[in-house]
Amino acid sequence: MTGFSDRVEHVSISGIRKVFEAAGEDAINLGLGQPDFPTPDHAREAALEAIESGATDAYTSNKGISQLREAISAKHERDNDLVVPPENIIATAGGSEALHIALEAHVGAGEEVIFPDPGFVAYDALTHIAGGTPKPVPLREDLTLNPATVEENITDDTAAFVVNSPGNPTGAVSSEEDMREFARIADEHDVLCISDEVYEHIVFEGEHYSPMQFAETDNVVVVNACSKTYSMTGWRLGWVAGSERRIERMLRVHQYVQACASAPAQFAALGALTGPQDPVDEMVAAFEERRDVLLDGLSDIGLETPTPQGAFYAMPKVPEGFVDEVLDRGAVIVPGEAFGEHGEGYARISYATNVEELEAALEIMGEAADAIR
Ligand SMILES: Cc1ncc(COP(=O)(O)O)c(C=O)c1O
């Protein structure tokens, strides 16, 4: 047999990449999913020191070095009011691997996984790869995930639902009340809630809550990463936190697909988490300023945009043909349908780029809007 697996049949190469390829090299890129800031010096230095001392030459323990897991545990206590012992944490190759092992460990053949639509592209793909059935659900008008929608879609075949706040591609932040509801749903229906919190520190209004804070059972696992918070997407360092039995199951997958997260990245993450946090505050302040520039510009163009309260994306409603018209004029934005069928009629604009570029792109968007009206 030389055929391909059904599990990969329905996984396509990300629609975002296709847009990049369609755009010219000098296009202004508002398609990026990563901060345009350097990794903080103290994180880089921690990695360099570890490399020079030879601490990175060997496999680490499968779950990751104990100092890092202690730092992540302390971070959960400090930021999330959560007690997650270091042994209940696995350091992973980014949030992506954390999502992958969470789904592999919990989703049975054909079981359903509910996730936001529009939503981060990996939820659909990784559900297929795990042999499950994706069940994308639409969002509220303000682009938050409604707990009632999740509850209505739960069936006997539901294995898990994914909550992502602050959200990609929406920038929407779930309220404390909604997070309490997600926890209740996970408890009462005995389904797993996978809470993807990779943007947790990039919040402008309100506060980040984790459903794990409110759950009475162990039916919530948290996925997080250094990628966005510390501008460390290239280092590939994330983690998953959960109860002992869930971690043990996820470790069964992690130990064979990854063995351990990259050792230099683990030391960099340790430096990032335990060092000064000012670079994060500075980055978040810059994102907020850019968000305001973008929102004002979009409103002048007449594009209705739910106010993003976090991450670094805005999702205006756009007329048909708008994204292509913008691309043709030299700026990259991503069509909403790249994030699910309910994303149609929207575009994702990333403001992980400087104000000058944002302003130039807004001019292009204004011309594009005029051209098709
Ligand atoms: C919502 C969300 N979750 C997870 C990830 C994966 O992050 P990582 O780069 O740590 O694998 C991303 C990356 O864009 C994301 O937007």
Image (cartoon, helix red, strand yellow):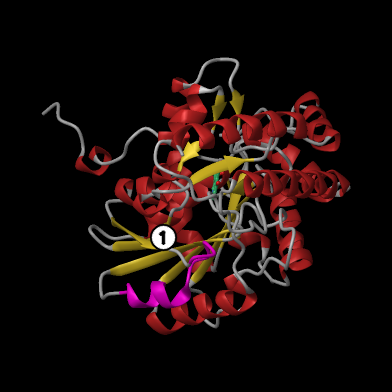
Identify residue for label 1.
115
Displayed quadrant of residue 35:
top right
Q: In which quarter of the image is the N terminus?
A: top left
The amino acid at mark 1 is Phe
Q: Give the range drawn in magenta.
A: 141-154
Q: Which residue is drawn at 59% across and 35% down?
A: 366
**Magenta stretch contains residue 159:** no
Please tell me in which quadrant of the rendered image residue 197 appears.
bottom right
Q: 107 or 304: nearer the eye? A: 304
Q: Where is residue 258 in the image (x, y as percent from the top left)?
A: 49, 39
Neighbor class of circle 1 (other Cα within 10 Å; few <14, some 14-19, many 20+) is many
Q: Kindly tell me whether mark 1's CB lies below 8 Å from ligand 1.
A: no
Asked whether the viewer can see residue 202, the reply is yes
Q: In the structure shown, which secondary structural element does the residue marked by tag 1 occupy?
A: strand
Please tell me which residue is depicted at 80% across the width and 37% down the height of the picture: 43
The image quadrant that residue 367 belongs to is top right
x, y percent for residue 117: 41, 56
Q: Work out which residue is located at the far left of the displayed protein and give it.
A: 1
